[in-house]
Image (tube, rainbow, N blue to C red):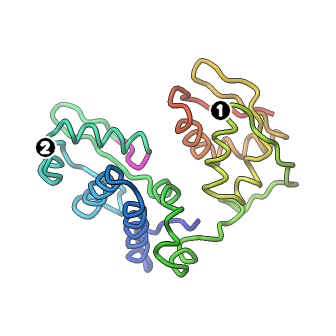
Amino acid sequence: MQTILVAGRNASAGKYDVLSALMAHGLASDKHRQRLVLRFMSLITTRYNWQRNELVMGQREIARLWCVDERTVKRDMARLRAMEWVVVRQQGARGRVSVLGLDLQRVMLDTRAEWANVGPDFVERVGGAPAVSTSNVVPLHRPAVIVGEGLWKEACRRLADEDRVLFDTWFAGLREIGAGEGCLTLLAPSRFHANYVQTHLGDRVRTAVRRCDGSVGRVEITS
């Protein structure tokens, strides 16, 4: 999947691609998800600073925009943070509102199933044929697919749905060797493999695991 450009020559197209993906995702979802996506899009189009990746907007101001009370704002913003579409960059203090950011790559991953509804040109443009990895580094050999167990098995399904090539190259060779006290431990086929996944793909693994079990706060990868 391509990196979303927020500045430069193709920045405008990248912004419209994000909004198009969100629109398609919302229209294909139930009414509750549709409403959440529409509210999220309203934050992007009215107050989001693309270049700085900053959203500075108080709950009262959001409530006025959404035409809801502040309790509803708290609930839906908590949902967006749990989805990792919204992240807290600087916690508010002494009467100052929090500085929020948006994880646009996570947004695009979560809306990928609906890209085809926009059209094949959109799929091709935003990365329908993803690269093998997020860098020029490739593994020395492709590990054999290992069927996961327990929590990791559920997380594998999510990772494979997001990016099958990336999954086959980096995630399929991991297996669960322990879970407890809020930590999932995975075993990689080599030290290089473990270090690469932990460093470059750790956020994606943690997100998939947390969406399967919110009580897991850490994922450790060993060899």
Farthest residue, direction top:
181
Residue highlighted by disc 1: 151
Which amino acid type is shown beneath numbered disc 1?
A: Leu
**Residue found at x 33% / y 56%:** 34
Which amino acid type is shown beneath numbered disc 2?
A: Arg
Front-lying residue, 66 or 18: 66
Name the secondary structure under disc 2: helix
* Quarter containing the N terminus: bottom right
**Residue found at x 75% / y 40%:** 194
* Quarter containing the C terminus: top right
Residue 141, image x, y percentages: 88, 54
Q: How far apart are marks 1 and 2 (CA)?
A: 39 Å
Residue 52, image x, y percentages: 35, 58
Residue 100, image x, y percentages: 32, 46
Name the secondary structure under disc 1: helix
Asked if residue 52 lies left or right of residue 110, the reply is: left
Which quadrant would residue 125 be assigned to in this image? bottom right
Sequence-first disc among 1 and 2: 2
